[in-house]
Amino acid sequence: MTRSQDCDIAIVGAGAAGLAAARWLEAKGVSVLVLEARDRVGGRMLNEPIGDGEIVEVGGQWVGPTQLRVNELIDELGLKRFETYDEGFNQFEFRGRLSRYTGAIPRINPIVLADIAQLQARIERMAKQVPLDAPWSAPKAEEWDSMTVMTWLGRKSHTSGGKAFFQLICEGVWAAHPSDFSLLHMLFYINSAGGLGKLIETDGGAQTHRIVGGSQLICKRMADELGDCVILEAPVRRIRSDGESVVLDAEQVQVTASRVIVAIPPTLAGRIVYEPPLPGHRDQLTQRVPQGTVMKCMAIYETPFWRKDDLSGQVTSDTGPVKVVFDNSPPSGNPGVLLGFLEGNQARELGQLPLEERRAEVLRCFARFFGAEAAAPLDYVEKSWADEPFSRGCYGGFFPTGVWTSFGKALREPIGQIHWAGAETATVWNGYIDGALTSGEHAAAEVFEAINDRRATKPAAA
């Protein structure tokens, strides 16, 4: 039997964006209800127990020092950070050769290094020209949005090694192949993070810190504050608006509010039925913003044995199928955990294999990087986000060619009583936990202003 509830503002999605919006509004005295499709909060953040009270994060996990809002919130919620293990030698597998290095740059052919340097310099210069609130207004927006990153690399790279290196970056950052998304999208995303280095570096970059107890605690703590305002297992199927109120039809509950914040990825927002239908430009946008494809694969060992060999556990490989590896052990250092990413085409292909075959492929990569001991873990954990019905991919949505310039304005603009939030709508740290939080708070401020304006102009009762 469907129950009915009323509130001032309804929110779709109990990920970081939706919960941040609810928390902001509740602090202003606005009544909220958050409808979450899953049986848990956290969205694309999820902790997985591995025994003895330890966890691994099978979803988003890292925060960096320039991600200001998430770091503020971590402190507000009483959580603690710890540094990603970054001691000893990193490894780089390039054209079949595995080498060790320290610092940010691997030791490879100096001609290739020079090519990588000139490509990065070009990208950094171009990215600074992309306005974060309106990427379509960049001086060369039409030109940059008309080509894929792969097309641009084919024109500007001088070596196959330089091209391959940036292909690896694209897979690692966007969980997509450089032929999947536009050059303008890459430039916007890089500017949103404050530079390419901030996206790919561990020391001072986006991978600097993890959360003690797991990143999902950020959402769990916010949900605990909100209490009964968060309703789980309530996927929203329809949103009806008439100019006076908005009605959300979800499983087992119907919510009536004055406005709604839809805080889920664009591709999922497009699967909700809207009455009246959304304008074509908004629906066309949601048809064109797919999610990245990634699988997080973790092998658990009694100890982080690679540390004895003075290895950081960090590997970058152009061979794959695992192309990026981290030491993902808990703060105590035990058990030892190797995290390998399957991203883009590798995730698409191996995601179709049976679990045992995929596990064998991942462990073969670990053994290649760290020796035979890596082939025999105590346990193995993986998560395919493309298979999650209420995510359909990770890390986030990306924009193929032509989308920013043709449909970008529809990403954040409210439509009547419907407002949008989520990491994909953020202007700073787009696609990250930090961006999700600021997007939710921005949408909350937007609806707060709207309902106050309406109250101010509403005629007084006779």
Image (cartoon, rainbow, N blue to C red):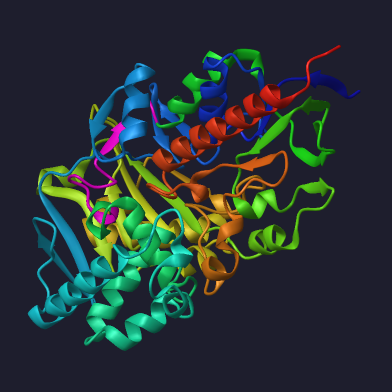
* Quarter of the picture holding the C terminus: top right
Seen at 46% across and 32% down, the residue is 47
The picture quadrant where one finds residue 155 is: bottom left
Is residue 232 inside the magenta stretch?
A: no
Q: Is residue 4 above or below residue 66?
A: above
Residue 318 in the image: state x and y as whole percent: 30, 71
Taking the image as shown, residue 238 lies to the left or right of residue 440, namely right
Q: Which stretch is magenta?
A: 199-214
Residue 261 in the image: state x and y as whole percent: 64, 36
Q: Which one is nearer the viewer's eye here, 293 or 132?
A: 132
Residue 124 in the image: state x and y as whole percent: 24, 66
**Main SS category, magenta section:** loop
Taking the image as shown, residue 255 lies to the left or right of residue 440, namely right
Q: Which one is nearer the viewer's eye here, 299 or 105?
A: 105
Is residue 207 inside the magenta stretch?
A: yes
The answer, for residue 371, to whether it is visible in the render is no
Seen at 50% across and 21% down, the residue is 222
Q: How many marks?
A: 0
Q: Which one is nearer the viewer's eye here, 450 or 311?
A: 450
Taking the image as shown, residue 139 lies to the left or right of residue 400, namely left
